Amino acid sequence: MCWSCYKPAKSCFCHDLKSFNTTTRFVLLMHPKEAKKNKTGTGRISHLCLKNSEILIGVDFSESRRFNELINDDSFIPFVLYPGESSYRVDYKEIPTEVSKLIKSGKKRPLVFILDGTWPCAKKMMLVNSKLHGLPRLSFSSSPDLRSQFTIKHQPSPVCLSTIESIFYFLKAWRKGEYPEVSSNSDDTVLLDGLAGIVNFQIKCALDPHLKSYRKGRYKTQDEKRNSIKWDKRKLFFEKENFQSL
């Protein structure tokens, strides 16, 4: 067992990953169910790629000592990377001017919380963590060619990306918004390389008739998959006004 990515040693590709540093501090709030999915989860690979990151496992972090330390640290400006009607698209420079100035002047460092789990699990985590409700939400612009490459997973909507892809596109949008970042576009590619490693290994296993994971037929691309019917009638992202009990 590799205790870095929590995969069997024979399927580990940690030695192929080159970690890089970022100005932005990334904190992955990992759902316990995701922590157990060692075969295909992208959260741990994201953490291995990002030197300036950490993982907190749980659902409700209101009593988490580390979570509260981070959110109350005066050297940071905390955000949550999560879509929503009130989210700021960083590539369009929508972050309020006074906040933007603090970051660009170096007086404050950006701290970005990322919910790592399935979309239903991420929605539940937003629901129960009231301290996240008051944080500014960050997002980036969608485009017709922005499609998840996590082909072994069925996303509820074409706009949904895996954790590792979300970080990659966030960093790309962050620099476009002219926010200070020490990583470069070439550094960021290691994130997509990590995703490709997961996908390629899973496909290889699926094509091997000697393994239990063998399946007939290929994995469809995201464009070939039908949108999830249940998500046509359900709210995909958490919005506080939809939960009056809060």
Image (cartoon, grey):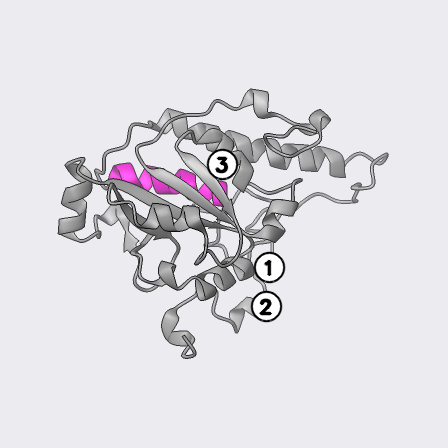
Q: How many marks?
A: 3
Give the farthest residue toward the right.
210
Residue 170 is inside the magenta segment: yes
Q: Label 3's element?
A: helix
- Horizontally, is 104 left or right of 239 in the view? left
Q: Label 1's element?
A: loop
Residue 229: numbered disc: 2
**Which one is closest to the eye, mark 2 or mark 3?**
3
- Please give the range of residues in magenta: 162-176
Residue 100 is inside the magenta segment: no
**Residue 97, image x, y percentages:** 14, 50
The residue lying at 60 percent from left, 44 percent from top is 151
**Which one is closest to the eye, mark 3 or mark 1?**
3
Mark 3 lies on residue: 46
Magenta part, dominant SS: helix
Mark 1 lies on residue: 226
